Amino acid sequence: MGRTRRYILGTFTRNYLLVFLPFLLIVSLVFVIQLSILSSKVTLGFTELTQLFGYMLPDIFFYTIPFSLIAALANTFSRFSAENEFVALFSLGHSPRKILSMLLPSLMIVTLILLTLSLLLYPQMKQKLNAFKTQKIAEATLNITPNKLSQNFGNFHLFVDAKAKDGSYKNMVLFNRDKEGKYQLFIAKKAQVTNDGNRFVLTLEKGTGESSTARKIETVRYEKLSFYQYPRAHYRNILTSFEYWGKAQKDDGRRRKLLYLLFVSVAPLLTYGIIAALTFYNPRYQRGFSSLAIFIVALIIYIPAAILQKYGTPLLFGLFCLALLAASLLLVRRKILRKF
């Protein structure tokens, strides 16, 4: 590897890490907040939290790598332009075409990493994450807090007055109302929540219940009444990535997700020319705007990606990819090769 190539790649790598590491931390914090919301509903140990966070890593990297790549390219070219380093490179006999080609292998490697994340790791981690959440909800101990509103047990809204030393609850109220206005109301002096390994069992003792129909209201008194929640899921075997995406042929939602992931994976490579054209300039006559360039390219990528995720078809995916590639080639030819 020549000195020029090492210098360009070194500058690009430093810029990439300066963007990637803080952005990775911010996105990771967002996912940690999601974990904290889940841990407020079920009991999770440190090992389980670490395992759950590991299942989220493909999503985290998929959000951070493309944007960091765009920002690093824009900052690298803007710096070379502002500090006249492109002029120095031209004086050494390096053409703009050659300079641009030096970063292409790195972009291809990053694209392969993104494709691996989206096509191979995403299906596996998504299935394991869903199975993990379902299992923990089924096995965990339900948290019921006295004198706290907005608690649920199945379809019932739940309120409890106090918790006894033996773990039982005093003066519990359960209420459920459907869309038609029918309701169910249960009041008990004592209640207990147990986990038999397959489901939660809420047992009410010494209480009354009331339910309405279209024509009448029924009232009952009971000594003991049990409710059940979260039966253990019968997990299927984890599908291979090929089997998972194979269902995209019949499942519109999965097909749109696949097109979205593929587009975001290849978009940074397809927009390479657009990024270069916006940040490759002569400082004597122009001013740099790398932040604006990052914003513009991010919109160019993520607006079509959002459309694909909601309305995506293979034809639309192909049109978006061709449009980005054509725009990149055209801008490089007009803004760079003709002027430098």
Image: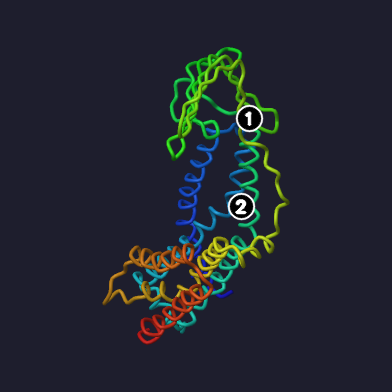
Label located before the other in sequence (2 or 1): 2
Question: Neighbour class for label 2 at 10 Å: few (<14), some, many (≥20)?
Answer: some
Query: Residue 5: horizontal and vertical position, in percent?
Result: 53, 73
Q: Residue furthest front?
A: 215
Q: Is residue 70 above or below residue 221?
A: below
Q: Quadrant of residue 48?
A: top right
Identify which amino acid the numbered label 1 is placed on. Answer: Phe
The three-letter code of the residue at mark 2 reads: Lys
x, y percentage for residue 56?
57, 49
Callout 2 secondary element: helix
Q: Is residue 114 left or right of residue 150?
A: right
> Tag on residue 257?
none
Q: Check the picture and name the quadrant holding the C terminus.
A: bottom left
Residue lying at the far bottom in this picture: please name it.
Answer: 338
Image point (70%, 46%), residue name: 235
Nearer the viewer's eye, disc 2 or disc 1? 1
Name the one closer to the observer, 186 or 98.
186
As drawn, the label of residue 200 is 1
Query: Disc 2 marks which residue?
Result: 126
Viewer-proximal residue, 322 or 207? 207
Report the residue at 60% width, 60% height from top.
117
- Residue 310: horizontal and vertical position, in percent? 47, 62
Please name the colour scheme applied to the rendered image.
rainbow
How far across and down, in percent of the image, does residue 255 sit? 57, 65
Would residue 133 be found to the left or right of residue 80 on screen?
A: right
Q: Is residue 195 left or right of residue 56?
A: right
Residue drawn at 63 percent across, 27 percent down: 201
How many numbered tags mark residues here?
2
What SS does tag 1 mark?
A: strand
Name the outermost residue toward the right: 237
| Quadrant placement of the N terminus | bottom right
